[in-house]
Amino acid sequence: MGRIAFLGPPGTFTEEALLTEADLAAGELVPLRSVPDVLAAVERREVDLGVVPIENSIEGTVNVTLDTLTFDADLLVQREIVLSVQLNLLAPSGVSLSGISRVVSIPHATAQCRGFLLRELPDADQVAANSTAEAARDLAASGANDTAAIGTALAAKLYGLDVLAADIEDHPENETRFFVVGPPGAIPPATGHDKTTVVCFQRADRPGALLAILQEFAARAINLTKLESRPTKRGLGRYCFIIDLEGHVDDELVADCLRDLRSKLEDVKFLGSYPAAGEHGPAVRRDAEAAWRNADEWIQELRGQVRRSARQP
């Protein structure tokens, strides 16, 4: 697999996610300080692939990842990884919960533990770090006896910290989704259980604009697994729509849908077609593909009967 960059330092959930994929784990792992650093390293071809968080089941989208892929980078998603996430409160040996006045972590992780922090550490200052592992590493290096970090059990082991409290996330069914991204020009082949991610840019803000986009998918029985809007950075009130859909650009239905969207919108940015995580359930897609092929054959037969000259009888 060559060189694989990930949000570091060692001990992040991103590293845990990539280690669940045997082929990625066999590569040369390159921890980098931030998500933009990881994506930039892939774009500059300093590494072969990058692994970054994209979405959490409690806190939602990791905006820095989505915005960088949408507006700043020219990369393609190669696969997704879904990891069950357990957040822990870490501290140097001998530190008690009652002595904590500062909690350090990446803001996305801190936000997943609002209830615990409000209940157990209501007066503690919350300090941002670039990652959960960076928070743990820097805490271990400082030896501060009034500070805790929110991070992984792996980070506690790596940096010699104690777990003061385990499973402190507000909801037990906590999962994070990660993207594996690579340079443009190489779309993974269809597997029958795939997702495609696109960004739709409107020509103008008008009533029914989003409905018109959604109707393209509904007309082809293409299921959307995620839909959200993000500001286009071009002024207030100007938004684009990021859409995850079931299927692959090599599927006839998906290709037909994207063709129509591209012809009607200001732009459609293709972020990738890639193997989906989770259980395989392509039966609806197969039925829809078969129906589309039958309809296409019918149209082609009708078009074959069109007279090509006014002189034809």
Image: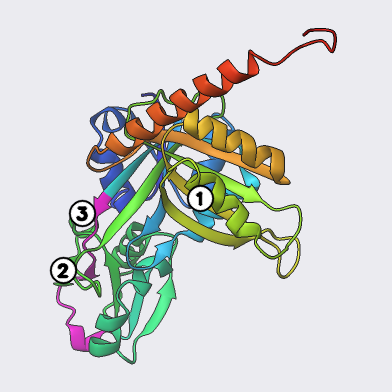
User: What residue lies at 66% left-to-right and 39% top-to-bottom?
Assistant: 262
Badge 1: residue crowd in 10 Å (few <14, some 14–19, many ≥20): some
Q: x, y percentage for residue 1?
A: 36, 24
> Would you name the residue on which mark 3 appears?
154
Q: Earlier in the sequence, mark 3 or mark 1?
A: 3
Is 92 inside the magenta-drawn segment? yes
Q: Quadrant of the C terminus?
A: top right
Q: x, y percentage for residue 158?
A: 22, 53
Q: Is residue 37 left or right of residue 189?
A: right
Q: Mark 1 and mark 2: span between their CA atoms?
A: 39 Å
Callout 3 touching callout 1 (CB < 8 Å): no
Tag shown at residue 89: none
Q: Is residue 105 left or right of residue 201?
A: left
- Three-letter amino acid code at the position of disc 2: Val
Badge 2: residue crowd in 10 Å (few <14, some 14–19, many ≥20): many
> Would you name the residue on which mark 1 appears?
243
Q: Residue 6: in sight, yes or no?
A: yes
Q: Circle 1 — which element?
A: strand
In the displayed structure, 204 sits above or below 245; it is below
- Three-letter amino acid code at the position of disc 3: Leu
Q: Residue 251: in sight, yes or no?
A: no
Bounds of the magenta span? 83-100
- Rendered image quadrant of residue 145: bottom left
Q: Mark 3 and mark 1: span between their CA atoms?
A: 33 Å
User: What residue lies at 45% left-to-right and 24% top-to-bottom?
Assistant: 293
Q: Is residue 103 left or right of residue 306?
A: left
Callout 1 touching callout 2 (CB < 8 Å): no
Q: Circle 3 — which element?
A: helix
> Would you name the residue on which mark 2 appears?
163
User: What residue lies at 57% left-to-right and 61% top-to-bottom?
Assistant: 229
Is 276 inside the magenta-drawn segment? no
- Three-letter amino acid code at the position of disc 1: Ile
